[in-house]
Image (cartoon, rainbow, N blue to C red):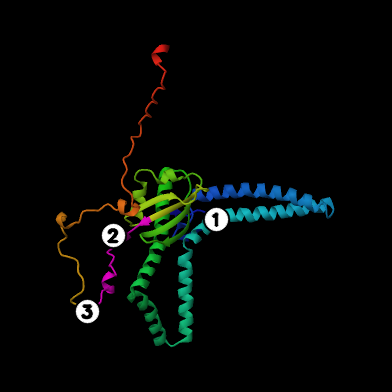
Amino acid sequence: MSKSTGRRLFGSHTRGQTVTVIEAPTRYNQRRKAIVAFWVTAVIVALLGGTIAAHYMHPILGGLLGIVFGALSGGALAVLIIIWPVLRMIWHWLPEILLAAFLIYGWQSLMFATPVWLSLLILAVIVGGPAAYGPTRRAVLSLFWCLTVRHRLRMCFAAFVAHNRQGTLPFILLARPARAGERVWLWLRPGLSLHDLEQPGQVQKLAVACWANEVRVSRASRKYAPFIRVDITRREPLTDTVLSTLPDHVPAHMPATAPASPAVPPVGVNLAEVPAPRSTRASNNNTKDRPRNPRNARPSAAPPSPGFDPSDYA
């Protein structure tokens, strides 16, 4: 809350005070960016447009037409930059705005088309039916948590940026339910990085802000560093009890002679009842075993021929 002045932008006057929708530093930065963008865009479009138009008409008329196009393009870009904080806020509240518009329009249409008692009955069925059916109730609660964590993360990021005095708020893209909680995608603005969100204690602050058990922050793309994924864990799906379907396949009435496994497994083997293995080599080949020669046996030397004495050459 700040005192009212003669200059107000995106604020409402209430009893001498102004309810600020956009902070003063943000308005100043957006105004400065809008002025720079206006002149840069106007000059570039005027030069290019005038040069192209000069080929089809008189150069003076082409230059004037380029100036007009440059001024219009620069003005449109400047207006977009100025109202960007408001557009971002509308994006953050877009699901709630659409839901409120649907409920109001649907209720009015229902009241005009049906009597009051029938409208109340239809409303009770629409509200009570999903609340009584388990899967529908859990799906509605998952969507509710997706809408809630978007605003909780935005508040946590606003406090983080205000504490560090650097960077701008991340752009919260989408959120969808997951088996363990919710998954949110972010687009980091200049001044922030994944390392800033992974600092000691920062992830725990995100978990506290989202009323969750655990929060994990990681990159959502190898190509784009600003694209971040936030996994919010509220429950452990792997710890749930999973019932086996095998008992359903067992018949209700089993015969008394059905085989059953012994209650106590055998602890030993009676080797006396095991027959000794019999070699089948001889019966298959119908040949007798021949003695084998050693592998490294050397051939015996040939006997000397008669009339030859090796000592004569010694």
Q: Is residue 245 magenta?
A: yes
Q: Amino acid at mark 1?
A: Trp
Residue that label 3 marks = 253
- Label 2 to label 3, Cα distance in Å? 34 Å
Q: Position of residue 46 (x, y in %)?
A: 73, 50
Q: Is residue 3 left or right of residue 209?
A: right
Q: Is residue 30 visible in this depiction of the protein? A: yes
Stretch of the chain drawn in magenta: 232-252
Q: Is residue 78 magenta?
A: no
Camera-nearest residue between 68 and 54: 54
120 relative to 1, above or below: below
Which is nearer the N-term, disc 2 or disc 3?
Answer: 2
Q: Position of residue 62 (x, y in %)?
A: 80, 53
Q: Residues within 10 Å of mark 2 (few under 14, many from 20)?
A: few
Could you say which disc has been placed on residue 84 in the image?
A: 1
Residue that label 2 marks = 239
Q: Residues within 10 Å of mark 3 (few under 14, many from 20)?
A: few
